[in-house]
Amino acid sequence: MPIYESVMQEKPPIVLDIGTAYTKLGFAAEAYPRKIMPTEVVMTTTGIRKRLFDYETPEELYDQLVDFLQTIFFKHLLVSPKERKFVLVENVFGPTVLRETLARVLFVHFDVSSVLFVPVHLIALSTLAVPTALVVDVGYSETSVMPVFSGVQIMGAFKDQSYGGSAIHAEIKRQLVESGVKESLLTESVLEDIKVRTCFVTTMERAKARANGGEDQPTPAPDVDYIVSDISDAVIQVPGLLRESAYEIMFEASNERDSLPHLILRSILDCTLDVRRALVESVFLVGGGSMVQGLLARLRQELQHLLTEDPFYAERFHGELQFKFFNAVGKQNFTAWLGGALCGATDLIQTRSLVKETYLKSEHVPDWSNLCDNRPTGS
């Protein structure tokens, strides 16, 4: 998609990727987001800090989005949103109330010019300039798998599970509390810092040896002392066993067969035969949770092992298959934002956006899941 001069002569579109834990924000045609900030809002009426998506009514969500976006525009980006074009990265299976409320805030409260909603899996893949891949998004609240073939998302093969960053934090907290650490020390920021600085994904051989039990256990990783910066004299000892076992919830064997390797293989099996080999040879990991050390190697080991050793998959996949992975452009935690920035620098921002005049006629955002929005012309 060429970059048109007419697009860039105007004010550059604002690109937002509002995630459950972090929000990426910046301008179109830039290589990096201007800011990555927690998706939290300080309410102007009460002064209470809370997560953006902790709400009970649409009206409460509306007020929180207004406060949150005001912080983005006037504190971080330092621009007026009026008559600006926007690119919003969204989950295609996200709540309808969220995208409707977000559109109402932008068009009615901030008087923006147009909004282009782009699906996270497809737009992340656009950074590679390839049309086909199996996109695995390891986020904070969930891990999702979406096959994309020839630039089209295969919705029927979409899979997701609840093991994301929050599940890892809960596992770290559980093990630390059992080892005698005070629960009051284990705030969300401390748990995340421990996860990022000390934890890793162990090899399949070591994980199976620990799962089987017995006396011949592998030597655990060394313990690490973590200093809580908020409290100068507080030191948390992070056991070596925790460091390499925290991420095992993504690979645990169960009767439901819902671990991450099974999720990927089941998603591929839900696609037609002619696209399966292409997906096996083009797996793309995105999201902040995929940046952990050792995840790529472990995932490749597990997938190849299931292909050859598991009878269920061995009789359904044919030929010599080798899983191959794409390397992300930049960092995985803002790959989807980068795709949105590329999209905002093309003519798609002109041809595919929802403009203010169209929205104000019905105050409704067209949705792929709504039959009224997808009727053929004349029906």
Image: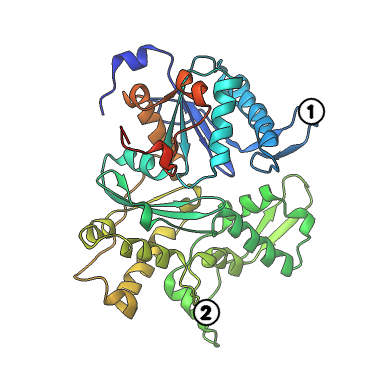
Callout 2: few (<14), some (14-19), or many (20+) C-alpha neighbours within 10 Å? few
Residue type at numbered disc 2: Ala
Residue 196 location (% of width, % of height): 56, 52
Q: Which residue is mark 2?
A: 211
Q: Quadrant of the C terminus?
A: top left
Under circle 2, the secondary element is helix
Tally the marks: 2
Name the side, left or right, on which 5 lies relative to 262.
Answer: left
Residue 59 location (% of width, % of height): 69, 34
Residue 324 location (% of width, % of height): 28, 58
Residue 70's place in the image compared with 259, above or below, is above
Q: CA distance from mark 2 to mark 1?
A: 51 Å
Q: Which residue is mark 1?
A: 45
Q: Quadrant of the N terminus?
A: top left
Whether residue 329 can be seen here: no
Name the one closer to the observer, 12 or 169: 12
Name the one closer to the observer, 349 or 379: 379
Residue 143's place in the image compared with 52, above or below, is below
Asked if labels 1 and 2 touch by Cβ distance under 8 angstroms, the answer is no
Residue at image position (58%, 66%) is: 222
Callout 1: few (<14), some (14-19), or many (20+) C-alpha neighbours within 10 Å? few
Whether residue 363 can be seen here: yes
Under circle 1, the secondary element is loop
Name the one closer to the observer, 282 or 63: 63
Which mark's residue is nearer the viewer, 2 or 1?
A: 1
Residue at image position (42%, 38%) is: 372
Residue at image position (43%, 75%) is: 205
Name the side, left or right, on which 195 lies relative to 208.
Answer: right
Residue type at numbered disc 1: Thr
